[in-house]
Image: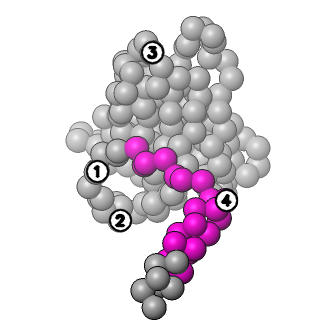
């Protein structure tokens, strides 16, 4: 009886080894970043990261329909309505780049291309330019003033000059939904 069980176990192991499945490489270690609550006026976005040149973009939050903004010294009314995108940028290149938050653009459902609202960015004390070294990760908000009826569809992201694209003329489109 033992001999039969041993032979049956060996046959199962032999068949399992011949199943054609490839052994999976071990998972790369990752950092455990604590989860944070989404701000009350914001929707969490679960979009995959996107590369533009040597910069990685992760859009993690969207707040649309903000009629005004309050800063430390003023309240600022939108011409239409403010849209706020929460963005994480990470330097992926071998050298540093100067990342310009004000170059980013929002495309609407009507095809309009909306630039970052400089006054809103200043009132909310968001960065202007950030030096991104290899592996440097920065999180901040982008503010856009859209016409009231416009819907935000795409963030056109510009990572910054690289050795292969010194002017960084071509952005990368990130669909927001």
Which numbered disc, 4 or 1, marks the residue closer to the eye?
4
Residue 109 percent across, percent down from the top left: 73, 52
Which numbered disc, 3 or 4, marks the residue closer to the eye?
4
- Looking at marks 4 and 1 on the same chain, the residue that comes earlier in the sequence is marked by 4
Which numbered disc, 1 or 2, marks the residue closer to the eye?
1
- Looking at marks 1 and 2 on the same chain, the residue that comes earlier in the sequence is marked by 1
Categorize mark 2 by other alpha carbons within 10 Å: few (<14), some (14-19), many (20+).
few
Residue 38 percent across, percent down from the top left: 35, 61
> Which mark, residue 20?
4
Q: Secondary structure at mark 1?
A: loop
| Marks 1 & 3, CB-CB < 8 Å contact | no
- Looking at marks 3 and 4 on the same chain, the residue that comes earlier in the sequence is marked by 4
Query: Image point 65% across, 64% down: which residue?
Result: 19
Residue 14 percent across, percent down from the top left: 58, 66
- Looking at marks 3 and 2 on the same chain, the residue that comes earlier in the sequence is marked by 2
Is residue 80 in view?
A: no
Residue farthest toward the right in the current orientation of the protein:
110
Q: Quadrant of the N terminus?
A: bottom left
Q: Secondary structure at mark 4?
A: loop
Distance between the alpha carbons at the discs numbered 1 and 3:
24 Å
Magenta span of residues: 8-28
Which numbered disc, 3 or 2, marks the residue closer to the eye?
3
Distance between the alpha carbons at the discs numbered 1 and 2:
21 Å
Mark 2, residue position: 40
Distance between the alpha carbons at the discs numbered 3 and 4:
39 Å
Q: Nearer the viewer, residue 159 or 102?
A: 159
Q: How is the image coloured?
A: one colour
Mark 3, residue position: 94
Categorize mark 4 by other alpha carbons within 10 Å: few (<14), some (14-19), many (20+).
few
Mark 1, residue position: 33
Distance between the alpha carbons at the discs numbered 4 and 2:
50 Å
Query: Image point 35% across, 44% down: which residue?
Result: 29
């Amino acid at each position: 009886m033992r001999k039969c069980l041993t032979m049956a176990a060996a046959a199962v192991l032999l068949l399992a080894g011949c199943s054609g499945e490839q052994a999976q490489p071990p998972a790369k270690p990752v950092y455990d970043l604590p989860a944070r609550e989404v701000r009350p006026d914001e929707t969490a976005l679960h979009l995959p990261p996107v590369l533009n040149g040597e910069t990685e973009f992760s859009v993690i939050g969207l707040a649309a329909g903000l009629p005004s903004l309050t800063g430390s010294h003023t309240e600022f009314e939108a011409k239409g309505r403010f849209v706020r995108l929460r963005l994480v940028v990470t330097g992926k290149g071998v050298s540093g780049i100067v990342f310009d938050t004000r170059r980013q653009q929002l495309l609407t459902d009507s095809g309009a291309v909306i630039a970052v609202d400089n006054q809103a960015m200043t009132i909310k004390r968001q960065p202007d330019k950030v030096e991104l070294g290899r592996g440097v990760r920065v999180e901040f908000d982008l503010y856009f003033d859209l016409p009231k009826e416009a819907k935000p569809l795409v963030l056109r992201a510009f990572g910054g000059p690289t050795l292969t694209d010194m002017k960084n003329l071509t952005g990368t489109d990130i669909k927001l939904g």
